[in-house]
Image (cartoon, grey):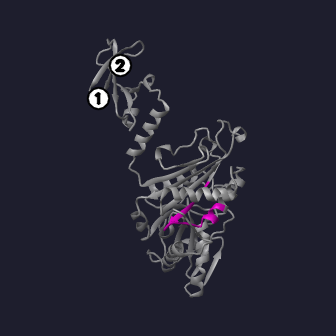
Amino acid sequence: MMACLRLIPPQSQNLNSIHFIHHHHRFSYQQHRLSYPVTKTNALTNSDLLDSDQTRVFVDAVPLLSCSQAYERLKTFREKINGKQQYLAMYSSIFGGITTDPAAMVIPMDDHMVHRGHGVFDTAAIMDGYLYELDQHLDRFLNSASRSKIDPPFDREIIRRILIQTVSASKCRKGSLRYWLSAGPGDFQLSPSGCHQSGLYAIVIQDLSPAAASDKSKGVKVITSSIPIKHPMFAITKSVNYLPNVLSKMEADEAGAFAGIWLDDEGFVAEGPNMNVAFVTKEKELIMPHFDKILSGCTAKRVLALAESLLKQGELQGIRMKNVTVEEGKKADEMMLIGSGVLVCPVVQWDDQVIGDGKEGHITQALLNLIVDDMKSSPPTVRTPVPY
C-alpha cells in the first residue's frame, strides 16, 4: 500500500508549523502557505478523498524517487497483491529479454498501445507442458496486426520462438500465454509516425482459482447486452480496445449473470464479450453465428471440427453456421459459450428464458469432453511442446 499525506483541519487557525508524523517520529516544517498540520498515513480511503471539506492532499510532499526506490515500491506493491493469478514470466522487445520478476513486468507509458489503444493481442493455453493451438492463434494475431497497420519487429518464426522460450522460462505447465503487438513507444501523439519501433510483449499467467471453472460447468445465466456492439471492421480484429467488452461484462455482473450476448446490426445473435456462442436445436443440429461480423474464435473453430465425430456417431444431425435469431436461440435445446477461457460452458438461462430443461445439455458436455481430451492428446499440428 503506498504511503500518502493527509491534511487534518486544525482546531485553531493560529498554527505556525506543519507537523509530519512518521511511525513514532515527529518533526516540524515551517509553513508559509498552509495552516494545516500534516499527518503521514499508510493509505487514503475513498471516503477521505470524497470529504473535500475536511481532507486535502499535500501535493508538495510527493516524493521524488530514484530508479531503485521506484523499483522497490513496485516490488512491495506486487508482493502485497493477493490476486487470483500469478505472472510467471514476461518478454519485452523493449528490454530485449525475459524477466520472471513481476515488479519488472511493465511497459512504457508512451507506448501507443497504452495511450491510444493501438495494439493487438492473442493468447494460447498451456496444458501439460504443451501450447495448445499456438499456430492458429499466432496466425490470427498477425492478421489482426496487419489490419491494425502494425508492422511486427520480427518475422513469424522468431515471434513463435520467443513465445515458446517465454513459457519455458516460466516453468509453467498449466496456465495461459498472452501476447501483444503495439505500435510501440515514441511520443503521445495520435499518429504512430513518431514511434521508434513496434513492441512485442508476452506474459505467462497461472490461474490460482481453478474452482471457478468447475462452478461454470453447472451452467450459467446470460443476458442480452445493451452495450453497442463493435462495428464488424473492429469486431473481427483482436485489438486491445476492449471497453465495449468490459462494459458488457460489468452489465452482466450487475444483473447477476455471467455474460452479455450481443446482437448484430440486423438483430441476429452475434457473440459474447470474449467468447463465441452456439446452440443445439431440437432437431439436434449444432448451429453457430457466421464469423463475418464477429471475432473468428480459434476454440470455436476447433469445437466445430471436433463435433464431426458426434455427427458420425449420430449424436448430431447437422453442423451449420448461420444467422441465428434471438427467438431461435432461446427456444434451442442447448446453448453454450465457447472460448479459450471457458472452453465449452453451458448456458441454462438467457434473460428470463430457461434454455432446454435448465440443465447442462448432453451435446454441450460431449463437446467439452472432446476439447479437453484434444488439449491433452491432439496431433503436433495442434499441440506445440515446450522445452523446459
Picture coordinates of residue 119 (x, y %)?
Answer: 64, 49
In this view, the residue in front, 142 or 228, is 142
The local crowd at label 1, few if under 14, some if 14 to 19, many if 20 or more residues have their Cα within 10 Å, is: few
Q: In the rendering, which numbered label is found on residue 171?
A: none
Residue 124, quarter of the rendered image:
bottom right
The residue singled out by tag 2 in the image is: 36
Residue 22, quarter of the rendered image:
top left
Picture coordinates of residue 63 (x, y %)?
Answer: 44, 27
Q: Residue furthest left?
A: 24
**Nearest-to-viewer mark from 2 and 1:** 1
- Upstream in the sequence, badge 2 or badge 1? 1
Q: Is residue 122 magenta?
A: yes
The relative height of residue 375 versus residue 151 in the rendered view (above or below) is: below
In this view, the residue in front, 39 or 354, is 39
Picture coordinates of residue 325 (x, y %)?
Answer: 61, 70
Residues at circles 2 and 1 in contact by the CB criterion of under 8 Å: no
User: In the drawing, does residue 367 fall left or right of residue 358?
Assistant: right
In this view, the residue in front, 11 or 74, is 74
Picture coordinates of residue 66 (x, y %)?
Answer: 48, 30
Q: Is residue 27 magenta?
A: no
Is residue 271 in view from this perspective? Answer: yes
> What type is the residue that disc 2 sits on?
Tyr
Residue 386, quarter of the rendered image:
bottom right
Q: Secondary structure at mark 1?
A: loop
Specify start and end residues of the magenta stretch as a single range: 121-138
User: In the drawing, does residue 378 fall left or right of residue 362?
Assistant: right
Q: Residue furthest front?
A: 388
Q: Secondary structure at mark 2?
A: loop
Tell me the CA gap for discs 2 and 1: 19 Å
The residue singled out by tag 1 in the image is: 23
Quadrant of the frame with the N terminus: top left
> What type is the residue that disc 1 sits on?
His
